[in-house]
Image: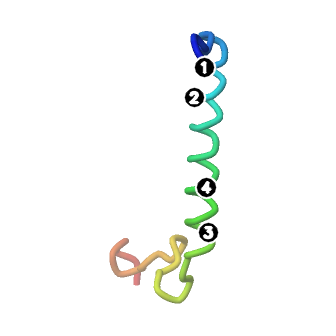
Amino acid sequence: MEGWKMSGKTLTLLAILAFVTLTVGSFVWFIVTWDKSAEEPVTWVDRIELGAS
């Protein structure tokens, strides 16, 4: 393909596609490798820290 060049529009669309692919892929990886038993729940509140009895 001699003299073949991508337009600015094509490069922009490829950059957006690469970003979306990377974002979705990292989110899927995070969900698939999540170990629920290794993490404490975020909603758990220690009453002693708040000063309540």
Q: Amino acid at mark 3?
A: Ile
Q: Position of residue 49 (x, y in %)?
A: 33, 75
- Residue 40 position in % (x across, y down): 47, 81
Query: Which residue is painted at 66% across and 12% down in the image?
Result: 9
The residue that mark 3 highlights is 31
SS category of the residue bearing label 2: helix
The residue where tag 4 is placed is 25
- Hey, what amino acid is under mark 1? Thr
- Give the spatial CA distance, label 2 vs label 3: 25 Å
Callout 3: 10 Å neighbours few (<14), some, many (20+)?
A: few
Residue of label 1: 12
Mark with earlier residue (4, 1):
1
Instruction: Tell me the distance, in whole angstroms, between the alpha carbons under discs 2 and 4.
Output: 15 Å
Q: Amino acid at mark 2?
A: Ala
Secondary structure state at the residue bearing disc 1: helix
Q: Please, is residue 37 above or below residue 50 in the view?
A: below
Q: On the rendered structure, is 48 left or right of 41?
A: left
- Residue 5 to residue 47: above or below: above
Q: Earlier in the sequence, mark 3 or mark 4?
A: 4
Among the two numbered marks 2 and 3 on one chain, the one whose residue lies closer to the N terminus: 2
Q: 25 or 34, which is in the foreground?
A: 25
Q: Are marks 2 and 4 in contact (CB under 8 Å)?
A: no
**Which residue corresponds to the image point at 64% horizontal and 51% vertical from the top-left?**
24
CB under 8 Å between callouts 4 and 1?
Answer: no
**Secondary structure beneath label 3:** helix
In the rendered structure, the answer to whether residue 52 lies left or right of residue 37 reads: left
Q: What is the tally of numbered marks visible in this picture?
A: 4
Quadrant position of the C terminus in the picture: bottom left
- Between circles 3 and 4, the one closer to the viewer is 4
Residue named by callout 2? 15
